[in-house]
Amino acid sequence: MTDPIITFDNVTYTYPGTETPALDSISFSVLPGEYVAVLGLNGAGTTTLGLCVNGVVPTMLGGDLEGTVTVAGLDVGEYAVREMAKIVGMVFDNPEFQMSQLSAAEEIAVGLENAGVPYEDMIRIIPETLALVGLAGFEERSPLGLSGGQQQRLAIAAVLAMSPQILIMDEPTSNLDPIGKQEVFDMAARLNKEKGMTVIVIEHEVEVMARYADRVIVLNEGKVVLNGTPHDIFSRVDELAALHLRVPESAALSTLLARQGLWKGETPTRTESAVDAVNTLLEARRG
Ligand SMILES: Nc1ncnc2c1ncn2[C@@H]1O[C@H](COP(=O)(O)OP(=O)(O)OP(=O)(O)O)[C@@H](O)[C@H]1O
Ligand SMILES: [Mg+2]
């Protein structure tokens, strides 16, 4: 059996100066190459969970961490964030705030420089990484002149340049238009499928999770309350409603139809499976 690349073993974390733990007795693991979506209401602890994986919690933020977070065989609490950055890349919701340089190439070079990567390697890595995120030839472009989707892909390129094994995206498209969203999610799916990269996406958009993720983890008040395949999780319509979480439209629609006796069988959690199911229903009627 493959060893997990991320393991949370009974992790409880409390920020400095607070009483209530942001993460409460969390245990789960992620296999290499998995695409995991993390879902929760505001304040559920999803960002904190990501920060535990890249070591910002507890190494930079302090606070009280109980239990262990193991990433690629390392106990995260014992390594500097700079060391963890070679294993875990994390991007946030506002790509513009992550841009600080005059050109796309420099944006990527900063992290490489900090990591002590020699210049000869940098001039190879920069164009390779830009190509990987669909920005080939963008070296001299000003980051602030790029579209939101392009900026977010550049932010992702900057972390990919360190060849991390794990990419964490924290609400990566919440400030992007629909095209930008699509660009970022398609790219992450490609990195996952073609490069075998482990991807963790913190997301509120359940349709996106149902479409791309291998697994969904639901947090509520710092606890893991659900952990399963997207189909398993999103067909639990009532449980999610009790947690004030949305389900994909296809699941919501079939549940309403089922209550009126118009739908039988599986709850579709992806639009495609809803279309198939509706077709079957119509064909049966035509009989
Ligand atoms: N730096 C901090 N200091 C103190 N408490 C914090 C800090 N950051 C977050 N918290 C608290 O920890 C809890 C979890 O926060 P976290 O940011 O992980 O939630 P989240 O699930 O990412 O929410 P959102 O969906 O709004 O981004 C919240 O109660 C929050 O107020
Ligand atoms: Mg957050």
Image: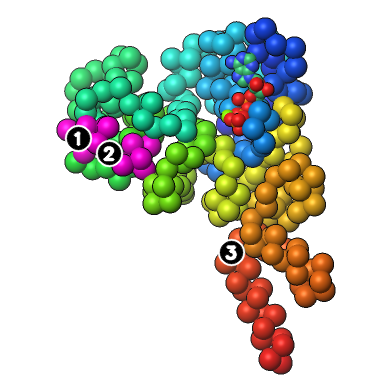
In front of the other: 284 or 44 = 44
Seen from this angle, which residue lies furthest left?
Answer: 140
Residue drawn where x is 76% and y is 48% of the image: 241
Chain-order first, disc 1 or disc 3: 1
Crowd around label 3: few <14 · some 14–19 · many ≥20 (10 Å): some
| Percent coordinates x, y for residue 207 in the rendering | 58, 53
Secondary structure, mark 3, is helix
Q: Which residue does the numbered mark 2 point to in the structure image?
A: 146
Chain-order first, disc 2 or disc 1: 1
Say whether marks 2 and 1 touch (CB < 8 Å).
yes
Residue drawn where x is 57% and y is 67% of the image: 272
Relative to 174, is 216 on the left or the right?
A: right
In front of the other: 275 or 27 = 275
| Percent coordinates x, y for residue 1 in the rendering | 65, 40
Q: Which residue does the numbered mark 3 point to in the structure image?
A: 271
Type of amino acid at the residue the image marks with label 2:
Leu
Chain-order first, disc 3 or disc 2: 2
